Image (tube, rainbow, N blue to C red):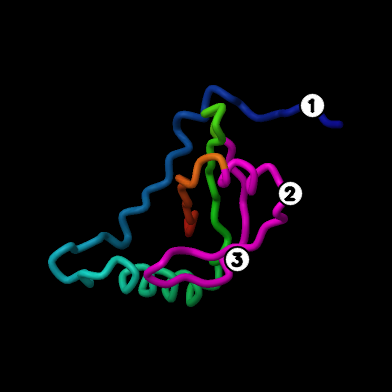
Amino acid sequence: FRTPTMDYSAIQDMRKEYSQVGLDEESAPQNPYDLFKLWLQHAVDTKEIHEPNAMCVSTCGKDMRPSSRFVLMKDFDERGFVFYTNYESKKSHQMEENPNAAINFWWAQ
C-alpha cells in the first residue's frame, strides 16, 4: 500500500472540456433509439472507448436505497436495453421489487 501523493485540493480543477460535439435537436432523429444508434456507433468507432457497451445500471429496491453497478449491454430496441444478470443477484431482486431503473453510458474521450 502506497501513501497517496496527489494534491487533493486540485480536485475541483480537474474538469475536462467536453464541448467537441453537441446535440443539435433540430437535426437529431425523432426516435430516441435511432439517436442512440448514432451515439453508440460513434462510441464504437472511437478507439479510445474500450467497452462502448458498458453501462451503469442503477436500481432501488423496496427499501428505496439506490444501488449502481456496471454491466454490459447485450442488445436494445424500442422495448428497452438488454443485459444479463443472475436471477438471484441483488440487482435482480431490486428490479423485482421496483421495476424502475436508470442506465448511464460513460463515453468520455
Q: How many marks?
A: 3
Comparing 108 with 83, the one in front is 83
Residue sitting at x 47%, y 52% = 104
* 2 vs 3, front mark: 2
Q: Which quadrant of the structure image shows residue 28?
A: bottom left
For this orientation, the residue located farthest to the top is 9
Dot 1 or dot 3: first in sequence order is 1
Dot 1 or dot 2: first in sequence order is 1
Q: Considering only vertical position in the picture, is 78 above or below 102?
A: below
Q: Which residue is mark 2?
A: 88
Comparing 34 with 1, the one in front is 34
Element at badge 3? loop
Q: Which quadrant of the structure image shows residue 100?
A: top left
Dot 2 or dot 3: first in sequence order is 3
- State which region is magenta: 67-96
Residue sitting at x 45%, y 33% = 13
Q: What amino acid type should be assigned to the residue bearing mark 1?
A: Thr
Q: Which residue is mark 3?
A: 51
Label of residue 3 in the image: 1
Q: Position of residue 18 (x, y in %)?
A: 37, 52
